[in-house]
Amino acid sequence: MEFIDYYKVLELDKSATTAEIKKAYRKLARKYHPDLNPNNKEAELKFKQLNEANEVLSDPDKRKKYDEYGKDWSNAEAYERAKAQQQQSRSQSSSRSYTHGGGGNFGGSEEDFSDFFESMFGGGFSGQRRQAGFRGQDYNAELHLDLKDAYTSHKRTLSVNNKSIRITIPAGIENGQTIKIKGHGAEGVNGGPNGDLYITFSINNDPLFKREGANLYKTENIKLTTAALGGEITASTFDGKVKLKVSPGTQNGQQVKLKGKGFPFYKKDNVFGDLYITYQVELPTKLSAEQKKLFEELKNTNL
């Protein structure tokens, strides 16, 4: 979450031409593309940074602002507007000041313009010089969690610009969801407020459970005899094991619902979705002679 030097990301210096930027981006984007680097988080982050760098440096207007203002380039227009208004204010102040008779000043005062600037930008005013305060740049980060991490509320310590902050991640956070941590972006300029930190959550797939909102889905294997005759099995839920009664004649692909055994709803205490279990009937692959004989007898009954 440190300031990212877009030129270094593209392995270029500041004198690079537009063509060189385009060529470098294409070369590195191929190298770090997610399709060529499956499950490689470092390559995924690098690819994201490459896209950001290309978006800024391939646009002449954005690149000019980036070269001049660095990490605060996105606030360039606000800086320039403030400068223009400052110059305009000084010009108006000068034109209103003139000598009358003994030399009295009947023009507008400096304080008039100070109030104007403070109302717009919150900046300080000192003598002939006005300093406008600007809000700091927002930071964006991605935090990876396992599904089990998103199941319960817990605290995490993050390092942001060499500062440690402790946040609480609410149970039920969704994949792709973004939360805002106020005031933990870049520092403000000239006394302006800090920017904010936006964290987007990437939740990894679970080998046993599939999540859709607050509901969970899983497959449970049952024996052929249990499916035909009924019985009891022990099934895993997300927070433990339960015993299930299997009805006689259960079909392959049949689904049962376990109410309240799904995932917690986001920011709703003790409210859970449901768990849907799909039965997969296991067909025997290695039969003893006696078992084959029994199946032959069943076959003769046209079962």
Image (cartoon, rainbow, N blue to C red):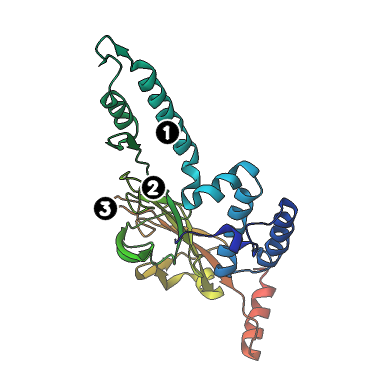
Residue 297 shows in this picture? yes
* Number of the front mark, 3 or 2: 2
Give the residue type at disc 3. Asp
Circle 1/circle 3 CB separation < 8 Å: no
* Number of the front mark, 1 or 3: 1
- Between 17 and 139, the one nearer to me in the picture: 17
**Which residue shows up at 37% across the image and 22% down it?**
94
3D distance between C-alphas at marks 1 and 3: 48 Å
Looking at marks 2 and 1 on the same chain, the residue that comes earlier in the sequence is marked by 1
Q: Local crowd at mark 3 within 10 Å, few (<14), some, or many (≥20)? A: few
The quarter holding residue 29 reads bottom right
- Between 106 and 207, the one nearer to me in the picture: 106
Circle 3/circle 2 CB separation < 8 Å: no
Residue 243, how many percent across, how many down? 37, 70
Give the residue type at disc 1. Ala
Q: Which residue has dot 3 on it?
A: 269
Looking at marks 3 and 2 on the same chain, the residue that comes earlier in the sequence is marked by 2
**Residue 94 in the image: above or below residue 235:** above
Residue 145, how many percent across, how many down? 43, 65
Give the residue type at disc 2. Gly
Task: Name the disc covering residue 136, or none.
Answer: 2
Task: Name the disc covering residue 82, or none.
Answer: 1
Looking at marks 1 and 3 on the same chain, the residue that comes earlier in the sequence is marked by 1
3D distance between C-alphas at marks 2 and 1: 16 Å
**Residue 285 in the image: above or below residue 135:** below
**Which residue shows up at 73% across the image and 63% down it?**
27
Q: Which residue ends up furthest to the front in the rendered image?
A: 102
**Residue 56 in the image: above or below residue 152:** above
